[in-house]
């Protein structure tokens, strides 16, 4: 039987996946996102890129019905697939690092959903906070549990935003995508091209890039973003296999690429 990806109805891990999404929908409000941005976007924790990668040896993403390997394996699998297709070096690097924001668990806590045990503030498909939750969210039946959906300021199609403001000017649910995007944005040696940064920032934004929601908020610029994301997402999704790599084995190949785009010093999380 052909493997089906992103099946949220059946499989061994479904109860945990569903519970992560329920908690995420309950807790990720506009106010929560502002609080997390203040708390985590401090750029005061220096980490060597490879040590951050290694930290994901200890993290299994509970939101992912397709993967029960440590997250670092998923990163290597993505990168290797992009490399096998002869895509640009910066895109191979995106494959390797796109989920590094999950390293947040090292300084996160249960209360914020940013620990190893509680991951609803780190992983899972994200949505825009401050406006109506669309039915294209996974498990849309949980949308009603979000307190913002009772607040007239936040529960309309536009919510707190202006029509056509573009997704760069909205707030997404807090998680590893936005976190790592901001960390890299703040990294003085970062030379990654714009498509790379967009792939990192919006790869979990399924209700928009796959569900085509938020038409009132997006602009033509976002259509370009969507092409980049879709190009990347095939590798994020369809490369999940049981093949296990050693980080040290692939490092020799990726290190010069990482140094070309991110320099040699630590990255401040
Ligand atoms: Fe991700
Ligand atoms: Fe990923």
Image (cartoon, rainbow, N blue to C red):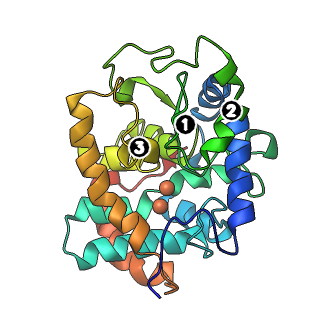
Direction from residue 66 to residue 112 in the image, left or right: right
Direction from residue 178 to residue 70 in the image, left or right: right
Q: Which residue: 41% across, 50% down?
A: 203
Q: Which residue: 42% across, 66% down?
A: 237
Direction from residue 223 to residue 44 in the image, left or right: right
Say if mark 2 contacts mark 3, CB within 8 Å.
no
Q: Residues within 10 Å of mark 1 (few under 14, many from 20)?
A: some
Q: Does residue 259 appear in this view? A: no
Q: Is residue 241 above or below residue 150?
A: below
Residue at mark 1 = 43
Q: Which residue: 34% across, 50% down?
A: 199
User: Could you say where residue 221 lies in the image, as x and y percent from the top left?
Assistant: 22, 32
Indicate the quadrant containing the C terminus: top left, top right, bottom left or bottom right: top right
Q: Say which of marks 2 and 1 sits in front.
A: 2
Between 269 and 145, the one lying in front of the other is 145
- State which tag comes first along the sequence, 1 or 3: 1
Residue at mark 3 = 201
Q: Say which of marks 2 and 3 sits in front.
A: 2
Distance Cα–Cα, label 1 vs label 3: 17 Å
- State which tag comes first along the sequence, 2 or 3: 2
Q: Secondary structure at mark 1?
A: loop
Between 264 and 73, the one lying in front of the other is 73
User: Could you say where residue 68 lies in the image, as x and y percent from the top left?
Assistant: 63, 75
Between 228 and 182, the one lying in front of the other is 228
Distance Cα–Cα, label 2 vs label 1: 35 Å
Q: Secondary structure at mark 2?
A: helix
- State which tag comes first along the sequence, 2 or 1: 1
Between 93 and 110, the one lying in front of the other is 110
Residue 10 occupies which quadrant of the picture? bottom right
Residue at mark 2 = 144
Q: Residues within 10 Å of mark 2 (few under 14, many from 20)?
A: few
């Amino acid at each position: 039987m052909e493997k089906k990806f992103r099946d949220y109805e059946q499989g061994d891990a479904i109860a945990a996946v569903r519970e992560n999404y329920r908690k995420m929908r309950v807790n990720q409000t506009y106010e929560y996102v502002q609080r997390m941005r203040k708390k985590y976007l401090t750029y005061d924790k220096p980490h060597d890129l490879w040590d951050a990668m290694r930290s994901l040896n200890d993290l299994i993403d509970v939101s992912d019905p397709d993967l029960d390997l440590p997250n670092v394996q998923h990163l290597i699998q993505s990168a290797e697939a992009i490399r096998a297709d002869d895509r640009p070096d910066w895109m191979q690097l995106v494959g390797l690092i796109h989920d590094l924001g999950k390293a947040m668990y090292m300084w996160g806590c249960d209360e914020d959903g940013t620990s190893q045990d509680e991951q609803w503030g780190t992983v899972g498909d994200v949505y825009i906070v401050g406006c109506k939750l669309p039915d294209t969210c996974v498990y849309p039946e949980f949308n009603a549990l979000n307190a913002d959906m009772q607040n007239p300021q936040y529960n309309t199609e536009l919510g707190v935003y202006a029509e056509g403001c573009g997704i760069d000017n909205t707030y997404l649910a807090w998680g590893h995508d936005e976190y790592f995007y901001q960390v890299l944005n703040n990294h003085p040696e970062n030379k990654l091209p714009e498509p790379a940064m967009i792939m990192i920032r919006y790869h979990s934004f399924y209700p928009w890039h796959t569900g085509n929601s938020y038409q009132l908020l997006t602009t033509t610029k976002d259509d370009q973003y969507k092409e980049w994301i879709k190009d990347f997402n095939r590798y994020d999704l369809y490369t999940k296999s049981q093949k296990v790599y050693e980080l040290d084995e692939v490092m020799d190949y990726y290190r010069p690429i990482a140094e070309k785009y991110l320099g040699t010093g630590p990255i401040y999380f």
